[in-house]
Image: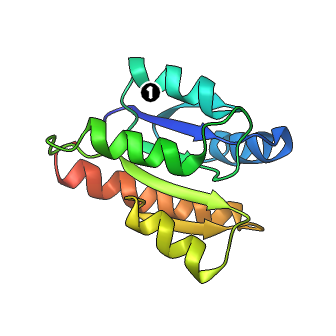
Amino acid sequence: MNNHQILLVEDQEDIRMLVREVFETSTLNYTLHEAGDGIHALKLLETMTPSITILDVMLPGGITGHDLCQYIREKHHSSQDQPCIIMLTAKGQRADREKGLALGADHYLTKPFSPIGLIGLISDIIKAQVRMGN
């Protein structure tokens, strides 16, 4: 099975640590990359193509999760290997969810979230990507 590249973009260190710890206890074959703001995330995205990106919406530095979602979709618009995008945010209103999905997010999770549920979702995504040959 491929080693999947996962990018976690989250400004809150405690949430990044929680997700990292849950990933470490999973049986997933992955490499986790982390960014604490949109600028660092954009630099990572210029040099790598994660198979899964987990985005917070509200980020410091002037680049939001929405901006990053749109960037990823535009960068890979003609590729059949579209990265999966999960929005993981405190912005849980219907309009927020609709905006995230309209920009190209595949999944929209709100905080507080279930770390076990997140790992389950990512495991399902990886299994689907493997079936599709990604």
Tell how many labels: 1
Determine the residue positioned at 74% across, 41% down. 16
Q: Secondary structure at mark 1?
A: helix
Residue 76 is situated, as x and y percent measured from the top left of the image, at 25, 39
Residue 94 is situated, as x and y percent measured from the top left of the image, at 59, 82
Q: Residues within 10 Å of mark 1 (few under 14, many from 20)?
A: some
Determine the residue positioned at 40% across, 34% down. 50
Query: For this view, does 124 lie left or right of residue 20?
Result: left
Query: For this view, does 80 lie left or right of residue 21?
Result: left
Determine the residue positioned at 66% across, 79% down. 93
Query: Image quadrant of residue 75?
Result: top left
Determine the residue positioned at 66% across, 39% down. 24
> What kind of colouring is applied to the model shown?
rainbow
Q: Nearer the viewer, residue 12 or 96?
A: 96
Residue 33 is situated, as x and y percent measured from the top left of the image, at 57, 28
Quadrant of the snapshot with the C terminus:
top left
Residue type at numbered disc 1? Leu
Q: Please tell me whether residue 65 is drawn above or below residue 86 in the rendered image.
A: above
Query: For this view, does 73 lie left or right of residue 131?
Result: right
Q: Nearer the viewer, residue 67 or 54?
A: 67
**Is residue 27 something that shows in the picture?**
no
Question: To which residue does mark 1 refer?
Answer: 45
